[in-house]
Amino acid sequence: MARVVIVGAGFAGHTAALYLRAQLGKQHEITVVNRYDYFGFVPSWVWVGIGHMAPERTTIALKPVYDRKGIALVVGRVTEVHPDERYVLVSPANRGGPLRLDYDYLLIATGPKLNFAATPGLGPETGHTVSICTLDHAVAARDSYLAQVRRLEQGERLTFVVGTGHPGATCQGAALEYISNIHKDLARRHLRHRAELIYLSNEPALGDFGVGGLHARYRGRLTSSEEFITAIYNDYGIRAEVQKGVRAVDEQRIYWEDYQGHEGETAYDFAMLIPQFTGQPIAYLGADGSDVSAKLVNAAGLVKVDATYGLDYAALREQPGAWPATYQNPSYPNIFAAGIAFAPPGPISVPHITPSGLNITAAPPRTGMISGVIGRVAALNIANLINGDRLAHHERMSEMFAVCVASMGDSLWDGEAATIIMYPVVPDHRRYPNGTGRDLFVTHMELGTSGAWMKRLVHETFMYKFKARPGWQIIPE
Ligand SMILES: Cc1cc2nc3c(=O)[nH]c(=O)nc-3n(C[C@H](O)[C@H](O)[C@H](O)COP(=O)(O)OP(=O)(O)OC[C@H]3O[C@@H](n4cnc5c(N)ncnc54)[C@H](O)[C@@H]3O)c2cc1C
């Protein structure tokens, strides 16, 4: 009998729990520890944040799913991992004392800590900006957004700024979706002419998305994602300001430094800026109580796996095999990490250091799809080890597809979405020596109302999959 503990029930952890249960006999125990008693379908929080979707439509209660499947659920926060003695400590949500959970295999799938504190004045709790990165944040963002709508209705002119709130932030796709949905919503309310919309980002160019941008044949022509997104923003009247690392925010202004080292500021009335993502604050302790975190996590608290770390950008660009394949920790082979919790070996996007030494580099995205795929790979590898086999499942981000359907208005009649397919996520310049590092037959960008239908379909099918309804495995991550 083996005991598996999974920390986090997001795209990575919840997917892993379902696959593990499908792989392992009932004699093996699977326990999921999650901070909340629900799974949150994060992509639809873009719509919650403008009041177009009820929050409860984006969540799935975990207990009924896990009861049906024979998975134990502990609602609470893992605060300590003891890798030598193989147990975790949980601070339960019901405020009971710390709970000890012993494991044979541990999967860390905690997603990001939203590190608002790295940017003074950022964030909804102690700062001045809103966020759509948790459900509570998205609901508060909605309320703040609707308050701005009322001001516009009274004739005021307002500036909305959406983008990244830290020089090393990722998740630009979410910001792009949010500002596009704000544009469509204000246009529908006939208020768009009173609002200035600014997209403020640390990307080297529009359409970079932390993956170095992409090229695809669009209407028969090789087009860059920069041209593609620029055309959309021009059409929507959204002003784009890229190559800017946000350093601080106050009640009225966002302070940034640009690639050239110039300092500047952007005035705003409403701002949603994505914070830096780091690892969750978990203590990693040896049998004698000493700190063994160096064996498990990098300086940002993200879990080290089977990647080659320490390569500079130029070397990493030439070695797609440096990206992890099995997601196993090298020091503790019974510990795996998946989703945003694993430590990437470096950026995909071209890094930039300003003359003042500020590192403005978009971090690599680990989207919902990528997190789900990695959760499945890690789960199948854990099942291999439990069944006495070798690790048989490998999927590097340099061998992985990603499909991103970026909502630009949720209406099924006049909404749109940009559908972006890329293969592989991390360019492989040896396999695809065409200057882009990607397969130009597969990589694709498309904008249209059909994408809005697709995005709605994605919401419904994934809610079905994550409820583990019959046939859930047929729906790809
Ligand atoms: C607004 C927004 C829109 C997005 N849109 C898209 C999209 O359209 N398509 C796409 O592919 N991706 C999208 N993404 C990215 C996607 O949501 C993430 O890549 C994905 O959620 C990462 O999955 P994860 O499992 O690693 O982390 P999460 O989904 O964050 O899940 C981690 C879970 O672990 C829990 N947890 C954290 N710490 C602990 C702890 N110590 N103990 C116990 N539990 C803990 C958390 O509460 C959470 O439930 C979007 C992101 C945002 C913010």
Image: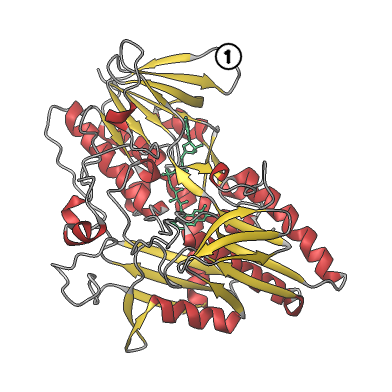
Q: Is residue 383 above or below residue 59?
A: above
Image vertical order of residue 403 relative to residue 394, above or below: below
What residue appears at the point 37 percent right and 45 percent down from the top-left corner?
339
- The residue at the point 23 percent across, 27 percent down is 332
Closer to us: 165 or 429? 165
Q: Residue at x 60, y 76 (%)?
A: 238
What number of labels is visible?
A: 1
Asked which quadrant contains residue 154, the reply is: bottom right
Q: How is the image coloured?
A: secondary structure
Most distant residue in the bottom direction: 220
Name the residue nearer the viewer: 152 or 472.
Answer: 152
Residue 95 horizontal side relative to residue 214, left or right: right
Across and down, in percent, residue 414 comes to: 61, 78
Q: Is residue 116 left or right of residue 335?
A: right
404 vs 232, left or right, is left
Using the image, determine if residue 200 lies above or below residue 282. Answer: below
Query: Measured along the vertical axis of the image, is residue 220 above or below residue 92?
Result: below
Residue 104, image x, y percentages: 27, 20
Tell me if residue 52 can be seen: no
Q: Nearer the viewer, residue 340 or 378?
A: 340
Q: Quadrant of residue 187?
A: bottom right
Residue at 52% in and 70% down: 452
Looking at the rendered structure, the kind of residue marked 1 is: Gly
Report if the beta carbon of the residue with label 1 is closer than 8 angstroms to ligand 1. no
Q: Which residue is outermost to the right?
A: 154
Q: Quadrant where the N terminus lies?
A: top left
Tag 1: Cα neighbours inside 10 Å, few (<14), some, or many (≥20)? few
Residue 175 is at least partly visible in this image: yes
Tell me the SS state at disc 1. Answer: loop
**Residue beneath disc 1:** 96
